[in-house]
Amino acid sequence: MPTPPTGSNRLHQHLIEQILFTLRRIMGEGVYADKAIEQAFKFHPKWGSRDRRLFAESTYDIVRWWRMLWHLAALPEKDYLKPTALSDTALWRVWGVYWLSRGKALPDWDVCRGIRMLKNPQSTPAIEASVPDWLYERAERELKKDWPSILEALNKPADVFLRVNTLKYKLRDLQIKLGAEDCDTQTVPDVPDAIRLIERRNVFTSPLFKAGYFEVQDAASQIIAPFVQVEPGMRVIDACAGAGGKTLHLGTLMKNKGRIIALDVHEYKLKELRKRATRNGVDNIEERVIEGSQTIKRLIASADRVLLDVPCSGTGVLRRNPDAKWKLSDEEIERLILLQAEILRSHSRMVKPGGKLVYATCSILPSENEKQIKSFLAENGGEWSLENQIHLRPDKQGFDGFYAARLIRLAPKA
Ligand SMILES: C[S@@+](CC[C@H](N)C(=O)[O-])C[C@H]1O[C@@H](n2cnc3c(N)ncnc32)[C@H](O)[C@@H]1O
């Protein structure tokens, strides 16, 4: 069930109308939830912190619990993902039952008249956990007895973690400076550069962020770069670098010594990486757009370490991106599995003999994780050996769900 609200006694109809408008953009037009919320904030610069918090919390919570709320509002089950079913009346009913489910009384506005929650709702486990049937069935098939507790954890809002940029600052000093900005934090056992915010807040406006002293990065994601075992002076390829969350961390661990080649098929992501690298003071990264197989061929057997942070279902980060479960499909996961296998086959060739490859996903599904590595080793067993693999689970560590495997490319026998 949705989490209790933080401080909200007087409701303004205008604010709730903006929540409904944003829900229609997310659930009906496919806009990413974080983007839609950011755009609403830009459009309403006068909202105070209480309104912003109520707006963001309610929007995320309603998206997370969408299917269950739709059901409790007694709307037709088959329509819960149909954009054309998002009438004003349906949206008010969804919001109304959300509000009631939090133990709140509905305001006496005309639009709320007659809204009530279904009594004794006939339901299914997928409806109760607010996930699509296909995802429930797939995850149950793949994860078996582990699925219920993973699912429960995936339905809770995620904590905010920062990674201190150790090139510029010390973790303890950052905690003190943030504390002076009224932002209390705690350290995270076994994740040395991470701190957790005690209360969620927007840290992107902090001068400390603008000065490059920290990045916002989940603790599970912070475990991946150290797992690559880089050292200063190495030649490293981050082959699915995106906007560089892990590239920046690799550069920091390498103390700016050696070289990182950051590859991606999307130039706009690498441009964002460049901006972030400048802010972070990481200056050993070279970005290259993958324009075809030639880009990879030129780098064959050239790297001490290759990181493949492959495109995946993102089922490990549903706490953070609850809208993803409504946009994903079984077919899309099958397409991603083929792409991951292809990336493994092709991009692994960039590792030198004796070098190491890390394959990582933010998925909880074995078909994207250990099964991919198993088939890769079955095809290339003589050339590679599995050194270690880790599963990070939202229900175990309390971080996002991540998987990583580290393989060694064996030197050819003389
Ligand atoms: C999980 S995201 C990477 C996230 C990034 N490493 C980070 O830490 O912020 C996967 C990335 O793979 C990229 N990608 C998709 N197809 C690819 C391919 N064939 N080769 C390399 N990268 C690819 C996507 O554009 C996306 O940026």
Image: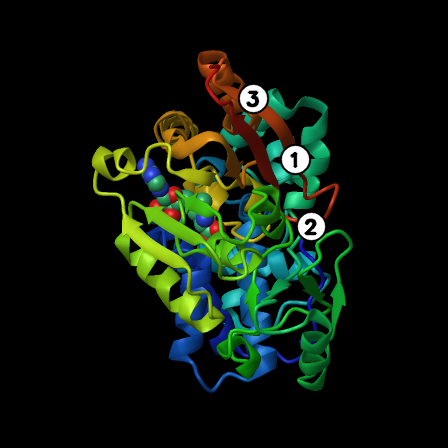
Tell me how far mark 3 sits from mark 2, CA to CA. Answer: 45 Å
Which amino acid, mark 3?
Ser
Badge 3 density bin: few <14, some 14–19, many ≥20, Cα 10 Å: some
**Which residue is the site of mark 3?**
385
Apparent side of residue 300 relative to residue 180 in the rendered image (left or right): left
292 and 281: which one is in front? 281
Whether residue 309 is situated above or below residue 187 in the rendered picture: above
Marks 3 and 1, the one that precedes in the sequence: 3
What mark, if any, has residue 94 been given in the picture?
none
Which amino acid, mark 1?
His
Marks 2 and 1, the one that precedes in the sequence: 2
Whether residue 285 is situated above or below residue 357 in the rendered picture: below
Q: Position of residue 86 (x, y in %)?
A: 39, 52
Q: Nearer the viewer, mark 2 or mark 1?
A: 1
185 and 190: which one is in front? 190
Badge 1 density bin: few <14, some 14–19, many ≥20, Cα 10 Å: many
